[in-house]
Image (tube, rainbow, N blue to C red):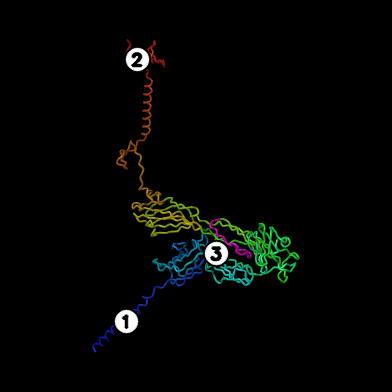
């Protein structure tokens, strides 16, 4: 009995504990629920945009609704989380008007287009009163894509056939739906596939089929000077109604009796009844040269029941011979589509779009790795030839020049930095760090367009600040970075408009900059006037006479010096003129100078 009682007591205690836990959970439902978002509605019209001003998905519209009035900031960030464009801000709003981003470096629909990549829409919500960040949302992404899609055509059969031929395309990227990816040919011809990628960029590709046997003459193949005409069945002579034999050749017959040749001469021909081929030997044909059977009684060829083949024309398109029935003598036209016409540092793809089907294996694309031109040579199915030129001049793969520091001013704990940049620079990225390797970025700003000025505020005394300036051009080229080091002395942090706060710039062998305040540089020694001052210790000037010079003293000093010079000159002149003993002669008037004839005073007494 005691044992059962103990079990009962333990079970009762356990039941009470479980009940307490359950009650606690029920009384605290908010403990298992996360805070609700202030964003009650968030939509974006396009996740892919192609800002090329063609009217198709050039922008995306962002629409937000909040549960209460908040401060809002909306920015577009690139893949490195740098602000690419500032779209919107408000000091208090609950249901803002929809905002558009046009794939530019600002909220406007004009200006340079940002590079193709994925961007993030960042929404920051703050409390109206306390300015506390309540919520940050980066859930929406926008992909900028300005490159037209391409496609490769595959055929169900490429050998000669009497069956339909299916052409299927494989696109280079995901396409908008619905889209037609295949086409069935029941006769030879061409079909143009049209499609658009998810950003709205249009693309096209032409499928050509010429291997369906619809006539007795299958093809005209081989080299320009030795084409071979193939037939699907044995040929018969219209004149004799007998199968053509190997005697149907230029050794037994005249080519002029059976064939018309323009722009080329037939040197020889021969027929092989087993292979059902007609071989020609020609001179070098001119572009547009033709060969055909003569449409003359008794000179034609027929099938085994006597049905005469319609005259077939072989036309040389500059590369190969093609067959035509002679009804089309108009050259094809075409236009060029470029992968981009905006400034770019990438290769540009030129795609030819023809007005009609072209012969198989025609080159329809050309990749430009630099500016220049390329000529497409195209031929329609009748052999008519056109030359279409593609010209590209928007490729720029040269980075902008490195920015150059021009001046620096340190005033009251702030640095005013001025720099110059090349004319092709459209934006600069300025980054500040306390480490030379920039492992942590303290401050970052994009100037678009650049201003050439930057203020670095709230500096800490005794700290070395490192910064780098990087330039970008319209094509997306990036300069090498200008790396700088700024040493902040403590005694200059509180100077207000003091010229000693000016600084100079010096460049080291490592191509970096260190800014040295003039107050720390060696000062020039002041001029010392002997009459008023004497030097003391090095760098000191001691005053000996504090009185002002009397008025007029300067003039008297000058007159005194002039007088001394005059006296010295007279003494010198008199000394030079004293006669020697052999220069004196006696006369009735006394001793005379030989040269001047003047009387010379004697120091001796007469006697």
Front residue of this view, candidates 363 and 476:
363
- Residue 18 bears which disc, if any? 1
Is 329 in the magenta?
no
Q: Are marks 1 and 2 in contact (CB under 8 Å)?
A: no
Q: Are marks 1 and 3 in contact (CB under 8 Å)?
A: no
Task: Give the vertical position of 484 relative to 182 (above or below).
Answer: above
- Residue 393 bears which disc, if any? none
Q: Residues within 10 Å of mark 3 (few under 14, many from 20)?
A: many
Q: Which contiguous range is marked in magenta?
A: 350-371
Q: In the rendered view of the protein, which quadrant contains the C terminus?
A: top left
Tell me if residue 505 can be seen: no
Inter-mark Cα distance, 3 to 2: 123 Å
Residue 245 in the image, given as x and y percentages of width and height: 70, 66
- Name which quarter of the figure residue 161 lies in: bottom right
Q: Residues within 10 Å of mark 1 (few under 14, many from 20)?
A: few
Inter-mark Cα distance, 1 to 3: 66 Å
Residue lying furthest right: 297
Residue in the image at 35% along x and 77% along y: 28
Residue lying furthest left: 2
């Amino acid at each position: 009995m005691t044992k059962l009682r103990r079990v009962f007591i333990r079970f009762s205690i356990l039941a009470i504990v479980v009940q307490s836990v359950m009650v606690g959970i029920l009384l605290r439902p908010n403990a298992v629920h996360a805070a609700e978002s202030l964003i009650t509605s968030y939509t974006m019209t396009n996740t892919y945009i192609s800002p090329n001003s063609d009217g198709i998905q050039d922008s995306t519209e962002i629409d937000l609704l909040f549960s209460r009035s908040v401060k809002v900031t909306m920015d577009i960030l690139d893949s490195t989380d740098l602000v690419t464009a500032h779209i919107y801000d408000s000091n208090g709003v609950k249901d803002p008007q929809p905002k558009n981003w046009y794939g530019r470096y600002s909220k406007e629909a004009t200006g340079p287009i940002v590079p193709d990549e994925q961007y993030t829409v960042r929404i920051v919500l703050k409390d109206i009163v306390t300015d506390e960040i309540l919520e940050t949302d980066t859930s929406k992404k926008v992909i900028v894509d300005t490159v037209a899609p391409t496609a490769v055509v595959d055929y169900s059969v490429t050998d000669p056939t009497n069956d339909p031929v299916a052409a299927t395309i494989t696109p280079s990227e995901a396409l908008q739906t619905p889209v037609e990816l295949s086409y069935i040919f029941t006769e030879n011809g061409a079909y143009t596939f049209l499609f658009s990628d998810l950003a709205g960029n249009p693309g096209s590709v032409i499928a050509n089929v010429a291997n369906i046997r619809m006539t007795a003459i299958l093809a005209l193949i081989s080299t320009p000077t030795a084409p071979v005409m193939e037939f699907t069945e044995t040929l018969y002579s219209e004149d004799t109604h007998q199968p053509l034999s190997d005697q149907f050749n230029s050794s037994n017959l005249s080519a002029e009796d059976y064939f018309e040749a323009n722009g080329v001469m037939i040197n020889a021909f021969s027929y092989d009844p087993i292979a059902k081929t007609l071989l020609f030997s020609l001179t070098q044909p001119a572009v547009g040269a033709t060969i055909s059977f003569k449409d003359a009684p008794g000179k034609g060829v027929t099938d085994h029941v006597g049905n005469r083949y319609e005259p077939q024309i072989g036309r040389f398109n500059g590369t190969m011979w093609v067959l035509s029935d002679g009804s089309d003598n108009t050259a094809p036209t075409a236009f060029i589509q470029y992968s981009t016409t905006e400034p770019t540092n990438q290769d540009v793809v030129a795609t030819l779009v023809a007005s009609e089907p072209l012969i198989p294996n025609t080159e329809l694309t050309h990749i430009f790795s630099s500016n220049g031109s390329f000529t497409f040579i195209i031929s329609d199915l009748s052999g008519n030839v056109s030359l279409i030129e593609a010209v590209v001049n928007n490729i720029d793969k040269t980075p902008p020049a490195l920015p150059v520091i021009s001046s620096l001013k340190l005033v009251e704990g702030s640095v005013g930095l001025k720099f110059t940049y090349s004319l092709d620079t459209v934006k600069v990225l300025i980054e500040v760090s306390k480490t030379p390797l920039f492992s942590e970025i303290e401050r970052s700003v994009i100037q678009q367009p650049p201003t050439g000025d930057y203020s670095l505020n709230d500096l800490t005394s005794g700290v070395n600040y490192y910064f780098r300036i990087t330039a970008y051009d319209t094509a997306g080229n990036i300069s090498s970075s200008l790396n700088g080091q700024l040493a902040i002395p403590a005694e200059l942090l509180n100077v207000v408009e003091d010229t000693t706060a000016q600084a100079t710039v010096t460049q080291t062998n490592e191509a970096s900059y260190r800014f040295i305040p003039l107050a720390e540089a060696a000062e020039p020694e002041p001029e010392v006037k002997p009459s008023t001052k004497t030097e003391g210790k090095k760098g000191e000037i001691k005053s000996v006479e504090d009185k002002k010079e009397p008025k007029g003293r300067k003039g008297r000093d000058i007159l005194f010096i002039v007088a001394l010079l005059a006296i010295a000159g007279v003494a010198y002149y008199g000394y030079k003129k004293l006669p020697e003993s052999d220069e004196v002669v006696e006369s009735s008037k006394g001793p005379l100078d030989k040269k001047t004839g003047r009387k010379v005073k004697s120091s001796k007494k007469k006697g």
